[in-house]
Image: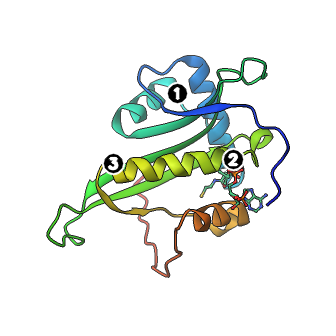
Amino acid sequence: MARRSYAPSFVIEFLFSPVSEPDADDINDLMLVLHRENTGNFVPITTDYIDWVANEQRVLVARVTESQSKWHGRIVGMATLNSFPQLGAYRGNDEIQAIENDIAVIPALQGYGIGDALKVRLGEIAKEIGASSIFLTSHENRGVKPDNLYRKHGFVRKDTRIYVKNLV
Ligand SMILES: CC(C)(COP(=O)(O)OP(=O)(O)OC[C@H]1O[C@@H](n2cnc3c(N)ncnc32)[C@H](O)[C@@H]1OP(=O)(O)O)[C@@H](O)C(=O)NCCC(=O)NCCS
């Protein structure tokens, strides 16, 4: 894929509690990116809820550091990583499985390598916590971008059936 010529500098960092209102607004913009390509009506997430998620799991964000950029200080990309020990994967060591979710970059800055940087950091963190594998799901209606991104970072698509039971 041909990269655009200019990318504002950014850092990948954890989102820590307490989450500020501007950061919560940016997270909501990213939720909208994920939601728009999915289904119906978008209900904004409250700052308290984002705060709770940031406490419960690893929320990675891409924050623009370039002072000249109109996005300076803003969160323009995100992804989350959960981990838990798995009985079924036990092979003599602690077997931790990591799960990635919610990767998104604002449309104006897609194609600048932010998704790549998030994926690299997610992979590093998964290794740091001793994960033996990383799991993610992606609906096919999300198109070629995430599919390419995941394959580029070494993910192999499985044929496993996914079962979901909605409780609410
Ligand atoms: C998927 C997404 C996170 C990628 O982020 P990004 O910052 O645009 O991606 P990057 O610029 O870092 O590109 C990384 C890789 O993604 C793939 N990719 C990105 N844009 C692409 C495009 N327009 N066409 C095909 N592949 C593309 C390529 O593999 C690319 O690597 P390459 O440049 O070496 O070819 C972003 O497109 C997005 O937010 N999409 C909407 C939300 C979404 O679908 N999330 C996935 C949920 S499962």
Among the 4 quarters of the image, the one containing residue 134 = bottom left
Tell me if the residue at label 2 has its CB under 8 Å from ligand 1: yes
Residue visible at 65% across and 60% down in the picture: 146
Is residue 53 rendered to the left or right of residue 97? Answer: right
Do the residues bearing badges 2 and 3 touch, measured as CB atoms within 8 Å? Answer: no
The residue labelled by disc 1 is 46
Three-letter code for the amino acid on which mark 1 is drawn: Thr
**Closest to the observer, 29 or 16:** 16
Ligand 1, seen in the image, is in the quarter at bottom right
Three-letter code for the amino acid on which mark 2 is drawn: Gly
Does label 2 or label 3 sit earlier along the sequence? 2
**Closest to the observer, 126 or 27:** 126
Among the 4 quarters of the image, the one containing residue 147 = bottom right
Does label 3 or label 1 sit earlier along the sequence? 1
Q: Quadrant of the N terminus?
A: bottom right
Does label 2 or label 1 sit earlier along the sequence? 1
Residue 11 is situated, as x and y percent measured from the top left of the image, at 58, 32
